[in-house]
Image: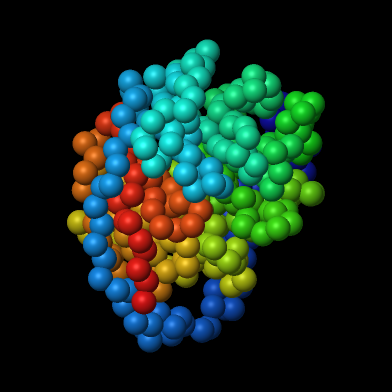
Amino acid sequence: MATEGLQENETLASLKNEAESLKGKLEEERAKLHDVERECGRRARRPGRFVMKTRRTLKGHGNKVLCMDWCKDKRRIVSSSQDGKVIVWDSFTTNKEHAVTMPCTWVMACAYAPSGCAIACGEAFLVKKSVAMHTNYLSACSFTNSDMQILTASGDGTCALWDVESGQLLQSFHGHGADVLCLDLAPSETGNTFVSGGCDKKAMVWDMRSGQCIQSFETHDSDINSVRYYPSGDAFASGSDDATCRLYDLRADREVAIYSKESIIFGASSVDFSLSGRLLFAGYNDYTINVWDVLKGSRVSILFGHENRVSTLRVSPDGTAFCSGSWDHTLREGWNRILLEK
């Protein structure tokens, strides 16, 4: 029976109530430490004038573009689509360098290896090496700081660290209560932590060495579709179906900013920072990309062009451009020729 092992006068309902009470007390203790308001944002100067336009459109997918990633050479892009294809693009010429047909559609995850010599996509590699057997769909993947290890997130509610060469599971991460939709590796040379977000409305920070969750944030009202570390690694942003993006400071252990407007009623599907971290780019399900001033919390610009929801976006490694993918079957690269931030 489910109630076996419970002490006298205890029920599952009473234990749940006790857990919620303890959770509330923890939040109260955390709130007591939040005794300083942010002042730097009020004093900061506004960014310089923003002029953005589409420079190139990459056409070739026959269905919704679901994921994309930049190569470290700042030129090549890999994208995956619901048409079951993974394409490597030359972003300068818009030519296709490689096209791989996967055994299934809905290739939701793809990533470039740090060396630029391999890509990961779902459960297969360009070099035909198979790894990562989750018990549900694979929603996100990212190489660590070497080509030999890869992190994956899955609809089975877990994340996992794998050895690419042997295909062996090195570490598993359990803690989410529903599908894990996204992850991002900390931008440090050691790279021992990563953040994940999922359908349980939680963003969780993990230690890859121990497999333990070291910080957890639950302030969104709906699924978290995207997480991205701030360039310094001291904070991260999230985008959610609740139509907001939020910034969490890991040192303060709290949410420090919400990026939203009453006129935005559609969910945020993907987020990424500019190279300096002053700007936050967010793709939405209403076909637009909003650019937020991270310090002031205000919207700097809104970009149009896609004809369906924006499913993915990434800023290039040198910060001079970014690429977005959409359910309109296209990728649009070079909205901003140069990010001018004053």
Q: Can you say which quadrant of the picture contains the N terminus?
A: top right
Is 322 placed above or below 170 here? below
The answer to whether residue 151 of the structure is visible from this angle is: no
The answer to whether residue 112 of the structure is visible from this angle is: yes
**Left or right: 211, with 293 as reference point:** right
Is 214 placed above or below 277 here? above
Residue at position x 76%, y 33% from top?
Answer: 163
Number of marks drawn: 0
Measured as percent of width and height from the top left, residue 302 is found at: 24, 56
Measured as percent of width and height from the top left, residue 101 is found at: 49, 16
Q: Can you say which quadrant of the picture contains the C terminus?
A: bottom left
Q: Residue furthest front?
A: 93
Residue at position x 47%, y 66% from top?
Answer: 277
Q: Residue furthest top?
A: 103
Residue at position x 33%, y 34% from top?
Answer: 58
Measured as percent of width and height from the top left, residue 169 is found at: 76, 31
Q: Nearer the viewer, residue 117 or 247?
A: 117
**Left or right: 212, with 78 as reference point:** right
Q: Which of the 4 quarters of the picture holds residue 111?
A: top right
